[in-house]
Image: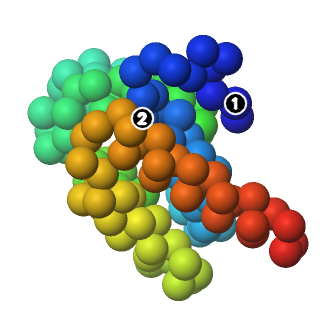
Amino acid sequence: MQPPADFGGQFNNRYCIGIMHDMEAPDTKFPVQELLRRLSDDTRSASEIARLSGVSQPTVSRLRTSNGRRVRRSASFNKLCSFYGMKTPSSSRPAGAYNELLRNAIVEAWDGSEEHGRALLVVIKGLKELRERHV
């Protein structure tokens, strides 16, 4: 994943989120495909599913079109699993619990400026490169 060639423009936090997504611990018990199958088989509108399950309509629509890409465990994911009668097993990997904590820590640390965003991005990329060298 490369930043745009003219990275001098406005800081792109989607790029930073993409890097963080790549660093997440895999969760082999995460029932993504089962939830996507149930969403696909459900003939109700995204609005109706959202209303009945307690999640937003854009979340339902995104999941329906995601093909499983970039789906993460979240309160909305868990609500949809519960809505369809699916159990959401807890992560068997301790590192999986850190995904949300790390995201929140980065958001709390970032002051919102482009300069600070770039600095955080350098740190995150440096950690990823360090990890790749030691694998």
Whether residue 78 is visible, yes or no, is: no
- Residue 13's disc number: 2
- Residue ID at (38%, 38%): 115
Q: Tell me if mark 2 has few (under 14), some (14-19) or many (20+) residues whose alpha carbon lies within 10 angstroms of its own.
A: some
**x, y (%) of residue 24?**
58, 61
Q: Which one is nearer the viewer's eye here, 86 or 114?
A: 114
- 1 in relation to 77, above or below: above
Residue at which label 1 appears? 2
User: Amino acid type of disc 1?
Assistant: Gln
Give left or right: position of 96 versus 46: right
Q: Is residue 17 above or below residue 2?
A: below
Residue 81 image offset from top left, x and y in percent: 36, 54
Q: How far separated are the C-alphas under marks 1 and 2?
A: 13 Å
Q: Amino acid at mark 2?
A: Asn
Query: Which of the 4 image quadrants contains residue 63?
Result: top left
The residue under the point 52% across, 73% down is 96
